[in-house]
Amino acid sequence: MIARARRISVALVGLCLAALCLVSLPGCAPADRGWADRPQTIAGGGTTGVYYAYGAHLAAALSEQLGARFSVQSTNGSVDNLQRVASGEAVLGFAQGDAVADAAAGTGAFDRRIPVVAVARLYDEYVHIVVRAGSDVQGVHDLAGRAVSLGAKGSGVEVVSHRILTGAGVDAAAIRNPQLGLEASITALQRGDIDGFFWVGGLPTPGIEKLAAGTPIRLLSIPPAVVDAVNAAHAGAYRQADFPVGVYGVPSATVTMTVPNYLVSRADAPESLIHDVARVLFDARASIAKDVPAAALLDRRQAIFTDPIALHPGAIRYYRETHG
């Protein structure tokens, strides 16, 4: 009887240790980690933008720390990313707050509401209107009749550029718009094929930084009155800001506007997956920021403010565990 009792006791201890392993040790897989056996994709952006760089480093950190296969996809940007996440083509994606608001409401580029939620608010993106330093284009009103890329089709840049032009009273139809992504816009400006381009991204955006190193550029100001007009039409999604003096080698201050961006996922993504994504996102912040400076702006106190979409339950659990 004693020997039998000992065997039962040992078995119970083993079961308890196994249970503890499942819920507490990072090296042990919980019951809902079936996602770890499948490749997971992050919808990034153009390869010369911050989204793609951030996504590539995040994918590497997730792969290393979670023992799963994560990779980043080149995309057209926010609208494209939201659509890929909604369709299940990507498990995570980066998106501007204005495109997120449209997706949540089923308006703008979205003909229906899509089931996306947030992992975190990441940082604020700056609206760039880039022209050559010697260009005679001095303001937004001077863009009429010019060849200017308003962003790739399906991008957040496209959303913002049209809103700015409307707010400034400029007819977008009066602009020759080749609908280029960032990399193609940079090449076209260098060749003289276009007079300028719009971009929305973190500071500094790698592609524009590289452009400015070989081709002197200017950033057009977006007057506060235009920002106010855009906000009046779009529920205050934007705020006024200044580019730091010296960014991209531009010596003078430039007034612009910013929009927050989010890391998003499908509402039905596994709870354990999104919990672990949130953990790695913050744990890897300093290492990612060495190559992607915008990552240093990630702040746990601000990350939870993701209106108009809710936080994923897995992200909520992470923030509760790390509160205080």
Image (cartoon, rainbow, N blue to C red):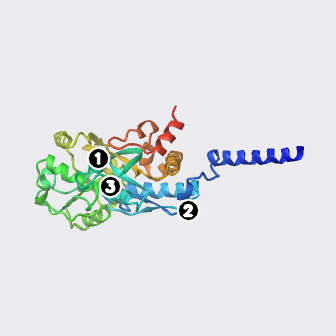
Disc 2 or disc 3, which is closer to the eye?
2
Residue on which the image places disc 1: 101
Residue farthest to the front? 1
The disc at residue 37 is 2
Residue reaching furthest to the top? 324
* 300 is higher (above) or lower (below) than 197: above
Q: At numbered mark 2, what does the secondary structure look like: helix, strand or loop?
A: helix
User: Mark 2 touching mark 1, by CB under 8 A?
Assistant: no
Real-space Cα separation, disc 2 to disc 1, in angstroms? 33 Å
**229 and 17: which is toward the camera:** 17
Residue in view at x 67 percent, y 46 percent: 19
Q: Residue at x 48, y 54 (%)?
A: 58
The amino acid beneath tag 2 is Asp
* Dot 3 amino acid type: Ser
Q: Are marks 2 and 3 in contact (CB under 8 Å)?
A: no
**Residue 78, label in figure:** 3
Q: Who is closer to the viewer here, 174 or 62?
A: 62
Whether residue 113 can be seen here = yes
The answer to whether residue 194 is left or right of residue 75 is left
Q: Position of residue 271 (x, y in %)?
A: 50, 48
